[in-house]
Amino acid sequence: MKQPYFIQPFVDTGLGNSAYLIGSHDTKKAILIDPLRDVDRYLYAASEQGLTLTHVLDTHLHADFVSGNREIAQQTGALIGASAEAKVGFDHQALTEDSIIDLGAFQIRIMATPGHTPEHISFLITNADGKTPEALFSGGALIVGGAARTDLLSHEMTHPLANHLYHTIHNKLLKLPDEVNVFPTHGAGSFCVAPASSERTTTIGKERVTNKLAQPQSEQEFIKRALTGLPMYPTYYKYMREINQRGAKILGGVPILKPHSPAEAKSLIDSGAVVLDIRKQKQFGEGHIPNSFGIRVDAPLLVWAGWVIPFGSRILLVGESASQMEDATRQLMRIGYDDVLGYIEGGIEAWAREYSVETIKSMNVTELRERLNDFTLVDVRNLVEWESGHIAGANHFEGGRIAWEEFPFSQDKPLAIQCASGNRSMIAISVLKRHGFHNVIQVEGGMTQWKLKGFETTRSAPNIIQL
């Protein structure tokens, strides 16, 4: 029997999120769920298939990206659907469990699924008669192998939301038939979730068997399990919910960046603009504008920019190509960094002809091992990586903390900064240099090279600086 609808996912691996286009080739109607802010790819896909977008829906007020709902509505006339509990400040259809979105070939029912956020809803696709559930778009209420975290709003709400999540999963979602397909928004790579499976979709039946949060357990056991192993998350998260509730500025597409001569760029920098260098770390280390943030475009940029660059900064880009610059602009707009002033025309080479550049020293792991006592070695990987094995005598200080917390290491010795391969250590060094740490050396290849050389590691009790 021919399926009355199709589902096209759009996965952003940098954010670890999926948006979904659901449409019917018969009725030529479609909806979009949880879109990012650069919406051209969704519009292109709908246009290629001759579809009219009737609705753009959000499962919740996202903490990790700016919703593309208003961009879609502005460009297509689609109706924005949001939880009535979200109390958004722009034109929308307030959705409750009494709401039904009927696209002819299929219906969408609303399920209140609080936990990840208080206003969270999920979208249940049923067949045209509205009786047989077939697919669940679960946002963060149920993901592959877990559920999205409940600690992003405040410490006071963490446990109450975990309690709501327990009832959402056990008293609602697990009541659905095993064959219902589940399409989460959050997945591997998202800081909205604890480490889970790399799979992006699942079924109710599979989660009933394999998801630890879906096993029979008390509320207390569930809450403890749900709050265990949660990683740090980027600082920009604290701004996203309010922006999505108020309604982000409509950009009308990916902004076209303005080129600036080195002299114009220097004037902007002197007036407070920050430089974001998106080249690879080796190129950044060989020469960059003083006080630049060095975050390569595939770091991923949006996570690390959102972690270390103050929100609301006026940003100048240094890159190598138009496509690299466009990629950076897309990533920045997804997380609300709208004040991108443009880029330095001619890149670092043009700048270097008129102004000074700085370099970053590096050393290989063999030299580090031979001279380990000459350095204060700082490992900037995350806690899980650190605990799985690190260099004896190293200090652990997660890279995302460096921009916002006191860096408690003496400069009596040179600082050797090490991560897994060199990406995060260069980001950390660019932040440290802005904070006045100049006797800093990057360990080339990080733990990856250290292990390839067969050098010893330890899993002793971590030497973590707690502030």
Image: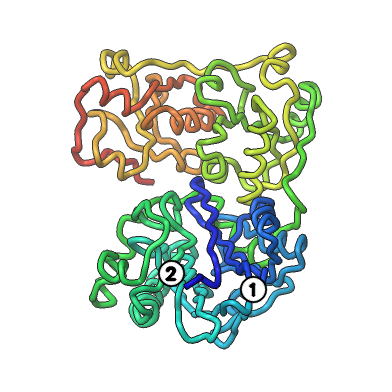
Q: As shown in the figure, which amino acid type bears the numbered disc 1? A: Gly
Q: As shown in the figure, which amino acid type bears the numbered disc 2? A: Ala
Q: In the rendered image, which quarter is residue 71 located in?
A: bottom right
Give how far apart the Cα atoms at labels 2 and 1 are.
18 Å
Crowding at dot 2, Cα within 10 Å, few <14 / some 14-19 / many 20+, comes out as many
Q: Which mark is residue 40?
A: none
Q: Which mark is residue 141?
A: 2
Left or right side of 128 for 317? right
451 over 146 or under it: above or below: above
Confirm whether residue 141 shows in the render: yes
Q: What residue appears at the point 60 percent right and 67 percent down from the top-left corner? A: 23
Left or right side of 370 for 325? right
**Marks 2 and 1: CB-CB under 8 Å?**
no
Q: What residue appears at the point 53 percent right and 29 percent down from the top-left corner? A: 430
**Residue 453 placement (x, y as % from top left):** 25, 20
Q: In the rendered image, which quarter is residue 56 located in?
A: bottom right
**Residue 309 placement (x, y as % from top left):** 59, 41
Tell which of 197 and 342 is nearer to you: 197
* First in sequence: mark 2 vs mark 1: 1
Return the residue at label 1. 81
317 over 365 or under it: above or below: below
Crowding at dot 1, Cα within 10 Å, few <14 / some 14-19 / many 20+, comes out as some
Question: Which structural element holds mark 1?
Answer: strand
93 over 233 or under it: above or below: below
Confirm whether residue 163 shows in the render: no
Left or right side of 205 for 301? right
Tell which of 392 and 189 is nearer to you: 189
